[in-house]
Image: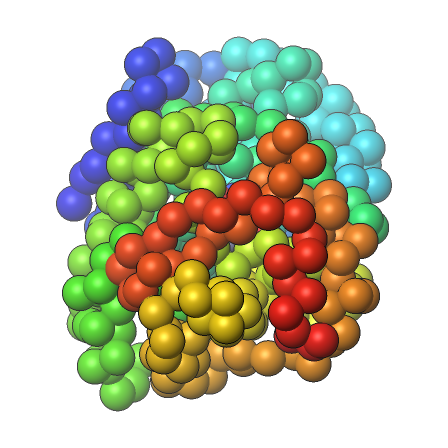
């Protein structure tokens, strides 16, 4: 199953196929014409798939590896100099390529490195977590976190291609399957009521796994459509941020240690919908429907943090346009809209 993101000269293909990682060289070789490639990965992912990728690439390229500790703490601004030093020591040039092998942390970090090192080198995404396969590897947003907030330093860097092998999900911890389902549920909430209903029907991971290729395809296709319409995130694309205004602030509040991204936005989607229901902006019962879906995937829907505590981080949200935040709200499941407001919007609740 292939898709193409149509962005003029920045267009790229997304390949989705079980077992793709076993013969990936034949796809990479026509794209990367340089002599060297640098794989950026984390210790956990590299231990599963690093050798397989390195062995294949070594048939055509001089191959290097930058391996960082796994986890969101590695997606931080001050890790960058060490990575740049490793690229320089390897003598990576502008005609070479960086390959991200990992989850969303690696994709965002390696993509930011690829967009800045030598003012930009070619970049390939091989997403290995569910979250990265359904969301983060597509769309070109790359970033690192600051102590003050998520993704505050970033760029748009389009990959040359995205290679999704759903077989890699077999080694992914259940917590991160659930984490990825947070973003899948988001897609159902904002754009696709039938996807949302479908997600309520699975009784186990094996059951879900039967349909995983189709679910990944559906999410990525929904993302492709809004990204093609509004690449730079000032209009339709903002919808993809449903739950993120609160979610990112919750991640930051706990110094990126307590909640994973998918968990934090799950709380954000429910709590924001509760507030919007109270204001008559969202159909009553919607937050409860979202909570039911999240419960099935063991995702949280409340954090018990005073809303006052989250305001500082929320004020730094990138959806701030002309001093108003663009809150993403649902009319009902499957139908979203942008609601510009200042932070007093969340005063409706004392805690989230
Ligand atoms: N750029 C975007 O559009 C976008 C979209 C959504 C999320 N994000 C970002 O993505 C990040 C979260 O991504 P994530 O949830 O993938 O986190 P992650 O990259 O930390 O991966 C989660 C964990 O799973 C492990 N892992 C990944 N693939 C594996 C596999 N196949 N087998 C075994 N272990 C594996 C990793 O080592 C890590 O411990 C956040 O920083 C978030 O802000 C970005
Ligand atoms: O691609 C987008 O646009 C998204 O909003 C997807 C989100 O799931 C993702 O978490 C993104 O990184 C958030 O973007 P940000 O602009 O709020 O940092
Ligand atoms: Zn997200």
The color scheme shown is: rainbow
**Quarter of the N terminus within the rendering:** top left
Tell me if residue 202 comes above or below residue 20 in the rendering.
below
Label count reads 0
In the image, what residue occupies the spot 53% across and 12% down? 95
Answer with left or right where residue 114 lies relative to residue 213: right
In the image, what residue occupies the spot 33% across and 43% down? 223
Answer with left or right where residue 227 lies relative to residue 78: left
Find residue 329 and report its horizontal and vertical position in percent: 44, 56
Extreme residue toward the bottom, this view: 203
Find residue 259 and report its horizontal and vertical position in percent: 65, 71
**Quarter of the C terminus within the rendering:** bottom right
In the image, what residue occupies the spot 59% across and 79% down? 302
196 or 217: nearer the eye? Answer: 196
256 or 44: nearer the eye? Answer: 256
64 or 264: nearer the eye? Answer: 264
Q: Is residue 136 visible?
A: no
The part of the image, by quadrant, that contains residue 90 is top right
Find residue 298 and report its horizontal and vertical position in percent: 46, 84
97 or 304: nearer the eye? Answer: 304
Q: Is residue 146 visible?
A: yes
Tell me if residue 85 comes above or below residue 290 in the rendering.
above
Find residue 260 and report its horizontal and vertical position in percent: 60, 67
In the image, what residue occupies the spot 31% across and 64% down? 332
């Amino acid at each position: 199953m292939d898709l193409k993101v149509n962005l003029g000269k920045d267009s790229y293909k997304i390949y989705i196929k079980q077992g793709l990682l076993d013969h990936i060289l034949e796809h990479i070789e026509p794209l990367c014409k340089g002599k060297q490639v640098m794989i950026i990965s984390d210790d956990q992912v590299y231990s599963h798939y690093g050798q397989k990728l390195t062995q294949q690439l070594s048939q055509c390229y001089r191959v290097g590896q930058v391996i960082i500790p796994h986890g969101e703490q590695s997606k931080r601004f001050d890790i960058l100099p060490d990575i740049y030093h490793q690229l320089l020591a390897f003598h990576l040039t502008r005609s070479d390529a960086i390959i991200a092998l990992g989850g969303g942390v690696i994709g965002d970090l390696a993509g930011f490195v690829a967009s800045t090192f030598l003012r930009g080198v070619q970049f390939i995404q091989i997403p290995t977590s569910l979250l990265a396969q359904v969301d983060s590897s597509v769309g070109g947003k790359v970033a690192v976190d600051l102590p003050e907030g998520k993704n505050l330093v970033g760029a748009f860097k389009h990959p040359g291609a995205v290679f999704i092998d759903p077989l890699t999900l077999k080694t992914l911890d259940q917590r991160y399957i659930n984490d990825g389902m947070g973003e899948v549920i988001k897609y159902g909430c904002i754009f696709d009521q039938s996807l949302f209903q479908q997600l309520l029907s699975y009784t186990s991971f094996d059951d879900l796994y039967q349909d995983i290729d189709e679910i990944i395809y559906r999410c990525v296709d929904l993302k492709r459509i809004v990204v093609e319409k509004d690449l730079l995130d000032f209009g339709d694309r903002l919808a993809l941020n449903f739950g993120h205004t609160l979610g990112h602030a919750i991640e930051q509040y706990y110094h990126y240690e307590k909640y994973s991204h998918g968990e934090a936005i799950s709380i954000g989607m429910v709590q924001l919908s509760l507030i919007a229901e109270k204001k008559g902006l969202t159909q009553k019962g919607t937050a409860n429907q979202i909570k039911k879906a999240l419960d099935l995937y063991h995702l949280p829907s409340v954090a018990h943090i005073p809303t006052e505590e989250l305001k500082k981080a929320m004020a730094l949200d990138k959806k701030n346009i002309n001093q108003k935040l663009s809150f993403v709200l649902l009319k009902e499941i499957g139908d979203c809209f942008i609601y510009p407001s200042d932070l007093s919007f969340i005063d409706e609740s004392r805690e989230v």
